[in-house]
Image (cartoon, rainbow, N blue to C red):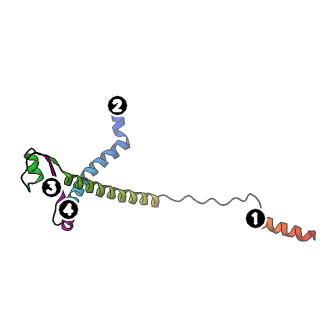
Amino acid sequence: MINEFKDFIAKGNVMDMAVGIIVGAAFTAIVTSLVGDLINPIIGLFTGGVDFTNNYAVLAGDVPAGASLEAAREAGASVFAYGAFIMAVINFLIIAFVVFILVKMVNRVKAAAEKPDEVAPEVSTGPSELDVLLEIRDQLAKGR
C-alpha cells in the first residue's frame, strides 16, 4: 500500500495539481487585494461612496440604523448580506477573466512552440484537368 501511494504521489499530474493549488492560493490573495483596494473604491466613486460589502437587509432582529454588517451580525440579527454577494460575484468574474487570459496565452505559446508539419508534396495520380481538356480539344481537332 505504501508503494502504491508513492507511485500515486510520484505521478506528474499530482505534482502539477499541487503546484496549481499553491499558485491558486497565492493568486487569491492578489485578486482579493485587487478587488478590495482598487475596484471597490472605483465602484464607490460611481455609487456615491457606497461600499457594497456592508450592504445588507435585516430579515429579523433589531439593528440600529446605519450599523455595519459586522455590528448587525454581532447583534444577532438575521441579515441578507447582498453586498457581500455582489462582491463575491465581482471577484469570480475577475478571476474567471484572468484565468481566461492566462489559458489563452498558454495556448498561444503552445501553438508557437509546435512545429508545423511538413507539407507533403502532392502526388500526381494522373493527368491534371487542364491536360485532359487539352487532349479532348486535340482529339476534336483531329476528328474534323
As drawn, 110 above or below 77 = below
The percent position of residue 60, horizontal first and vertical second, equals 13, 45
Residue type at mark 3 is Asn
Residue type at mark 4 is Asn
Q: Which residue is drawn at 31% across and 49% down?
A: 20
**Quarter containing the C terminus:** bottom right
Identify the residue position indicated by label 2 in the image. 3
Identify the residue position indicated by label 1 in the image. 129
Q: Earlier in the sequence, mark 1 or mark 4?
A: 4
The residues tagged by marks 1 and 4 sit, at their Cα atoms, a distance apart of 68 Å
Q: Are marks 4 and 3 in contact (CB under 8 Å)?
A: no
Determine which quarter of the picture holds residue 35. Answer: bottom left
**Mark in the foreground, 1 or 2:** 1
Q: Earlier in the sequence, mark 4 or mark 3?
A: 4
**Mark in the foreground, 2 or 3:** 3
Q: Earlier in the sequence, mark 2 or mark 3?
A: 2
Q: What element carries label 1?
A: helix
Identify the residue position indicated by label 4 in the image. 40
Identify the residue position indicated by label 3 in the image. 54
